Image: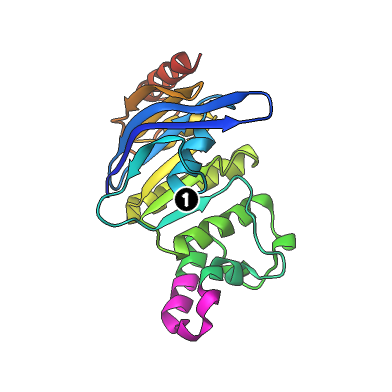
Amino acid sequence: MTIQLNALNKTYIGSNNKVCALSDTTLTFTDHSFNIVVGKSGCGKTTLLRLLSGLELPSSGTIEFGNTRPKIGFVFQEPRLMPWLTVSENISFSSKKNLATKSAISSSNIAALLITLGLSNFSNVYPAQLSGGMAQRVALGRTLFQNPDIILMDEPFSALDYFTRRGLQETLLALFQKERKTIIFVTHDVEEAVLLGERILIMQNGNVTADIPVDIPYPRDLAAVSVVNLRKQVLTGIE
């Protein structure tokens, strides 16, 4: 499902000033694509995701999803897990709204997700007992359990150490190649952008200043000439 943004604007009005977080943005996100939005803090990346998710309304402009609004999942920077629920219960939280319809299919989906995310041995563990990386895996599992058409991700790995972050990047990439969900992933990490994105959008001051298609096969090696050159291109665009 194609997402079309038409002259999208978002202005926040404070007591003494106006802040333009997104300015006259026109973009198209194609179905089954992995899109990275990269830029410095305050450039409008998160605002873009919040508008796409419906958490914020635009000041002007439109977002078009086609004839039917897609199911959208959101993975935040913090895991935001329910501390009184186990790993499995957090993943299947959306099904708790209608316990009468919960079936063996849901249980099998949870089991499959636990295997995919490397959490099989932590099914009955509570969030306080998890590392940061495992908690973020649970948050990703909770989103995937809903089987969304579009996954929005707001710097989901930024608070993690390098090795945990790389592991989760590899997990996400494997999931993308298997499921082909449409992903819009916000980051300020240029290495993360060049490792994951099929397309890299650079934002500055509420504007998309560069739209870079990436034709480098997965998995990518940061030392490869093509990846090094892409990294330089992105850095130049941000600076």
Query: Which residue ends up furthest to the bottom in the rendered image?
Result: 100
12 sits to left or right of 51: right
- The residue range painted magenta reads 95-111
Instruction: Give residue 237's position: percent from left, percent from top.
Output: 44, 16
Residue at 45% of width from left, 83% of height from top?
Answer: 101
Count of marks overlaid on the render: 1
Dominant secondary structure, magenta:
helix
Q: Secondary structure at mark 1?
A: helix
Where is mark 1, residue-wise? 171
Instruction: Give residue 144's position: percent from left, percent from top.
Output: 45, 60
Query: Which residue ends up furthest to the left in the rendered image?
Result: 67
Viewer can see residue 144? yes
Query: Which residue ends up furthest to the front in the rendered image?
Result: 15
Instruction: Give residue 108's position: percent from left, percent from top.
Output: 44, 76
Give 168 or 23, whichever is nearer the viewer.
23
Viewer can see residue 221? no
Give 51 or 216, whichever is nearer the viewer.
51
124 sits to left or right of 120: right
Give 101 or 107, whichever is nearer the viewer.
101
Colour option used: rainbow
| Residue 104 among magenta residues | yes
- How busy is the neighbourhood of tag 1: few (under 14 within 10 Å), some, or many (20 plus)? some
Instruction: Give residue 42's position: percent from left, percent from top.
Output: 58, 27
Residue at 54% of width from left, 60% of height from top?
Answer: 118
Question: What's the amino acid at mark 1?
Answer: Thr
